[in-house]
């Protein structure tokens, strides 16, 4: 099952995000089977203000637990995180 994750950064946490980015990327490399796609939301200045992730998990609880282990979450970068079931309909690759 797939889940859409929208995570909004706390204000003034860009430095923490940048410092934590290598661990965040390594975490998702280590959990590549669970990651479908991801990228940051950008502010008017082009700097990251949050994240959009599409993850695979067995159920809602597993998706929430996975996202809670993301180094960004552990470092307190996010002000809010919403995880909701998601169905990829348009432009879905055949192997997903």
Image (tube, rainbow, N blue to C red):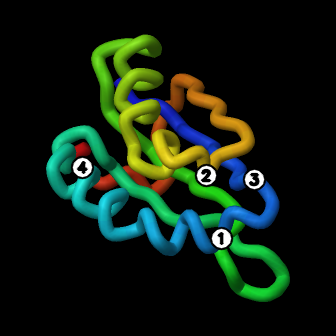
Q: What number is the disc on residue 94?
A: 4
Question: In 3D space, how far apart are the residues under numbered discs 4 and 1 (Cα atoms)?
Answer: 36 Å
* Residue position for label 3: 10
Q: Is residue 14 above or below residue 81?
A: below
Q: State whether residue 89 appears in this view.
A: no
Question: In 3D space, how far apart are the residues under numbered discs 2 and 1 (Cα atoms)?
Answer: 8 Å
Q: Secondary structure at mark 2?
A: loop
Q: State whether residue 72 appears in this view.
A: yes
Q: What number is the disc on residue 14?
A: 1
Q: Earlier in the sequence, mark 2 or mark 1?
A: 1
User: Residue, x 31% and y 60% (percent of image)?
Assistant: 23
Residue 91: image location, x then y, percent: 44, 57
Dividing the picture into quarters, in which one does residue 76 lie?
A: top right
* Residue position for label 2: 77
**In this picture, residue 28 sits left or right of residue 62:** left
Classify the position of the C terminus by image quarter. top left
Residue 38: image location, x then y, percent: 45, 58
Viewer-nearest of discs 2 and 4: 2
Q: Residues within 10 Å of mark 1 (few under 14, many from 20)?
A: some
Q: Residues within 10 Å of mark 4 (few under 14, many from 20)?
A: few
Question: In 3D space, how far apart are the residues under numbered discs 3 and 2 (Cα atoms)?
Answer: 6 Å
């Amino acid at each position: 099952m797939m889940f859409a994750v929208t995570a909004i950064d706390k204000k003034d946490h860009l430095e923490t995000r940048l410092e934590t980015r290598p661990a965040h990327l390594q975490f998702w490399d280590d959990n590549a089977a669970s990651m479908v796609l991801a990228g940051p939301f950008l502010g008017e200045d082009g700097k990251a203000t949050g994240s959009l992730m599409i993850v695979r998990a067995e159920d809602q609880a597993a998706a929430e637990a996975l996202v809670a282990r993301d180094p960004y979450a552990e470092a307190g970068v996010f002000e809010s995180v919403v995880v909701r079931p998601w169905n990829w309909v348009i432009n879905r690759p055949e192997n997903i």
